[in-house]
Amino acid sequence: MVFEDWHTHNELCRHAVGTIEDYIKRAIEMNMDLIGISDHFPYEYLKNGSVLIDQVPYQEYAMKLNEIGAYFSTIQKLKSKYSDKIQIRIAFEIDYFRSQEEALNKYFKNRIEELDYILGSVHMLHGKSRLFAFDDWRFLGMYKEYESIDNLYLEYYHKLQSMISSKDFDFDILGHFDLPKKYNKRARDKDHVLNEAIKTLELVKKNNLTIEINTGGLRKEVEEQYPSFEIVERMYELDIPILLGSDAHHPNDLGYKFDITIKRLRKIGYNQLAHFNERKRTFIEIY
Ligand SMILES: [Zn+2]
Ligand SMILES: [Zn+2]
């Protein structure tokens, strides 16, 4: 069985452990067929815009703009060094912010053709009083600003919908689809929130995007992959392509619980996983 991990980080983002090479070596040790290097894209490009990015410790969330060049050249070097052992892909996980596409593309467009795929994610919300990263435990106090946790979920799904619909935000794979559940703060009106999630899935389908099954959630308080199998069932009905990511922030996270997750995906009906090369999607069989 082909074994590919499409979502990994490394020490460049300041909150992951290990060099890019450490991850590659570990992936080889684990007999993986492919590793996608998909570290967090910098937030600095937002500094002079309308997003008050200084309200969050963004320096701890991503590499710097002036490190992008080294990021590419390091991965290219490792790609040839280990070419007979493992396939290596170059990617970014990019955080979406409304109406910041132009600022982003200024830094990004010139390198986009060097990428194999782009993970589009939402980690931040605007709340009532300030910007905050809802997946950073230091901002858990901000949840109280919402009348109900459901409103946080709804704001999140609306932002995903904007990301998917944006003509200028270029991405291939939607990251950790139901991330607001990370700290196991569950929706109260479950059906209402699920409805918004399904509306989001319909947009994903319409735009021919892929969703990652992110096993990182299994290591968090929620102890469940993103998205839940309830959502994955809807994805299968809609024929939305999927692939697997561990969201590794330590080399030992690579391929985390892929075996049991694939078994569940097979039960739901999925028999193939998406695969990317130079932004082109193909499929591999799972069994
Ligand atoms: Zn991270
Ligand atoms: Zn993420």
Image (cartoon, helix red, strand yellow):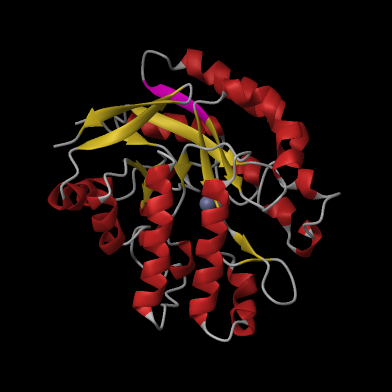
92 on left or right of 3: right
Q: Is residue 142 above or below residue 174?
A: below
Q: Residue furthest right?
A: 48
Measured as percent of width and height from the top left, residue 54 is found at 80, 59
Q: Is residue 208 above or below residue 25?
A: below
Q: Is residue 220 visible?
A: no
| Figure quadrant of residue 108 | top right
14 on left or right of 219: right
Measured as percent of width and height from the top left, residue 37 is found at 50, 33
**Which residue: 64% across, 71% down?**
138
- Is residue 275 found inside the magenta-colored segment of the image? no
Q: 36 or 172: which is nearer to us?
A: 172
- Is residue 88 found inside the magenta-colored segment of the image? yes
185 on left or right of 165: left
Which image quadrant: the C terminus? top left
256 on left or right of 74: left
Classified by dominant secondary structure, the portion drawn in magenta counts as strand
**Which residue: 56% across, 18% down?**
76
Q: Is residue 208 visible?
A: yes
Which image quadrant: the N terminus? top left
| Figure quadrant of residue 41 | top right
Measured as percent of width and height from the top left, residue 135 is found at 55, 64
**Which residue: 81% across, 56% down?**
50
Chain part drawn in magenta: 86-90
Measured as percent of width and height from the top left, residue 107 is found at 74, 33
Counting every numbered tag in the picture gives 0
